[in-house]
Structures are given as structure tokens and as C-alpha cells.
Amino acid sequence: MMDLYSIGEMLIDFIPGSEPASYIRKAGGAPANVAIAVSKNGLGASMCCKVGDDDFGRFLMDTLAEYNVKAACPELCKEAITTMAFVTLLEDGERRFTFARKPGADTLLKESDVREEDIADTVIVHAGSCSLSAQPEAAATVRALRLGHEKGKLVSFDVNYRNVMWDDDVEACAKAVYDILKYVDLLKISEEEVDMMGGEAAIPALMKEHGIALVVETLGANGVRAFYAGDTFDVAGRKVSAVDATGAGDAFWGAFLAKLRISGVEKAADLNAAIIREALKYGNISGSICVQTKGAIASIPTRMQIEACMDK
């Protein structure tokens, strides 16, 4: 039994290194970072994606293999579509993203790439809104979420608005997200994206309407907020001096899902306040550690590192 099945569009981030003109490559995209965070916590994770047979694509697949993430679509495609995100850290701590895409329709995920047997042999099915673009790969994501829901799996979704996929069309992105919420048990949303979903005050009604068990809002260095069964839980962020943070939200969610799995949670009905509070702290520390250490994927903590922090 695999713990996590993650699906989505793949990015490769180039993060400025400590020396001028040097960069650290990071296999990015929320589904990859979530899978890696789960795997680094000693759990089984698989990633369903398609990438081009070029230097970037091979680097991405090698990175997944390095962190023991099983590739559900292992073949590299001749016509590359690797998406690259160049991340620039500004003096005020903000990040600037520049995206570059190389088109290749044969590399887009298709519904047939999502195998029913893979979904059946897992506990948590995860996807991010990056893969809900107007492109054909949206059908593959919808299939994965629908199958996960139908088979009683814990279905996780990350509202991860990216202008590279949506060209700043907020209405189109929101509609695509709303269309799949009926399949979702756990929803992660970042602070800047809450307005897209109707604002913080709309979240309880959103949960009731779509049957969502838990919504977690990540607040960057300020921590996280969770909405569950009429309650709101706040977990303060640890104060950090470093800026990087690329992938921190994804690392947080992966650690959070790992903690749920470690706690024995396999479906939304198993969630309770004590488990959620513990998992939020566990995940929040993951994000903070990731913020403190440049290199993103390398800084996603292991289960042992997180537990050591929790003991302090």
C-alpha cells in the first residue's frame, strides 16, 4: 500500500545561490514537493507526471528518484514541455518569478495516465491547481481526484494559483477549482489566494457546501490557520531570519499529510481536533525549517528533525 499518490504539472525552479550568477536547481511544483516531503518522513510516495527528455526533465526525474519518490509515469517524452521558474530574491524579501515554457502536447498528462490500480493501492490522493489549467492535463487531475473520492481515499488538494498556467485569469482558475471541490476532503490555500475563493468569511460555507472536512490556510512566516468542524485553529509561525521559502508551503503540506498518515488517519471521518492540532504544528515547523535553509528540497526536514524540534 502506497501512502501518497501525487499528480500534477511539473516545474523546475532555479533559485539564486550564495555566489553571484550561481543557481540551485529545485524540482518544483506543489505535487513534487509534497511527495518528497512525505517520502523524507519515511512514507511511500508516488508522482504522476510527464516531462521532456532534456536536461531539465532528466534532472527532475533524478531528483524524484533521489528522494525515493516512485514515478507513476516514468517515460520521458521526446518533445519537451518542461516549465522553468526563475526565482529572484529581492532586497525587501519578496520573490519575483519569471516563467518559461517549452510547448509539446505529447507530454501533457492524459486521463489514461492515471491508472485505477494506482489509486486503489494508495491512502492519500493529492493534486494542485497548477494541473487544472485549460490544457488537457486537467482531465487527468480530475480523474485522479474523482477516483480517489469514489474509492474512499483521503483526497487532498492545494489551491496553488500560478500565472504560468492561468495568465492571471483568476475567474477561470477559481471555476476549475470549484468544479473539483466535491471530491476533496483536505484543502490547502495560501493567504494571497483566499480572496479568489470568496474570502476568509466564506470558508465555513464553502466547506459545508462541498463536504470538505478541513481547510488549512498558510500564512507564510506568520504560521497557519485551520478551519475544522466549526472551529478555527491558529498555529503561530516561528520567527526566521532567512528569506528563501521557495517550496516552504508545499513542504509544510507534505509534512502535514505525513503526520496524518503516521497518526493512522486514512479518511476524513478519522480526523479529530487533537490530530489536526498536532499535525499543524508538525507541518508548520517543516515550513519554517524550509524558510531558514536555502536550497528548498534539501531543506525539507526528515521526520527525525521535526520530532527533535517538537521536543524543544
Image (cartoon, helix red, strand yellow):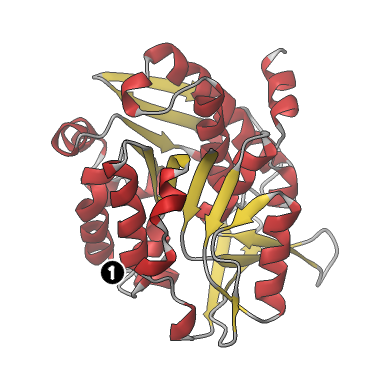
Horizontal and vertical percent position of residue 303: 69, 29
Q: What amino acid type should be assigned to the residue bearing mark 1? A: Asp
Does residue 101 appear anywhere in the picture?
yes
Task: Tell me: 228 left or right of 123.
Answer: left
Q: Which residue is mark 1?
A: 169
Q: Nearer the viewer, residue 110 or 58?
A: 110
Horizontal and vertical percent position of residue 86: 62, 70
Query: Residue placed at 53% from the left, 44% from the top?
Result: 249
Horizontal and vertical percent position of residue 31: 51, 53
**In the image, is residue 129 above or below residue 109?**
above
Task: Tell me: 31 left or right of 207.
Answer: right
Q: Nearer the viewer, residue 96 or 284?
A: 284
Q: Nearer the viewer, residue 129 or 193?
A: 129
Element carrying mark 1: loop
Query: Residue placed at 63% from the left, 47% from the top?
Result: 36
Q: Quadrant of residue 252?
A: top right
**In the image, is residue 18 above or below residue 280?**
below
Does residue 236 appear anywhere in the picture?
no
The residue most toward the front is 117
Q: Quadrant of residue 239?
A: top right
Query: Residue placed at 65% from the left, 41% from the top?
Result: 39
Task: Tell me: 22 left or right of 182.
Answer: right
Rate crowding at label 1 as few (under 14), some (14 to 19) or many (20 or more) other CA atoms within 10 Å.
Answer: few
The residue most toward the right is 19
Quarter the C terminus occupies: top right
**In the image, is residue 105 above or below residue 249?**
below
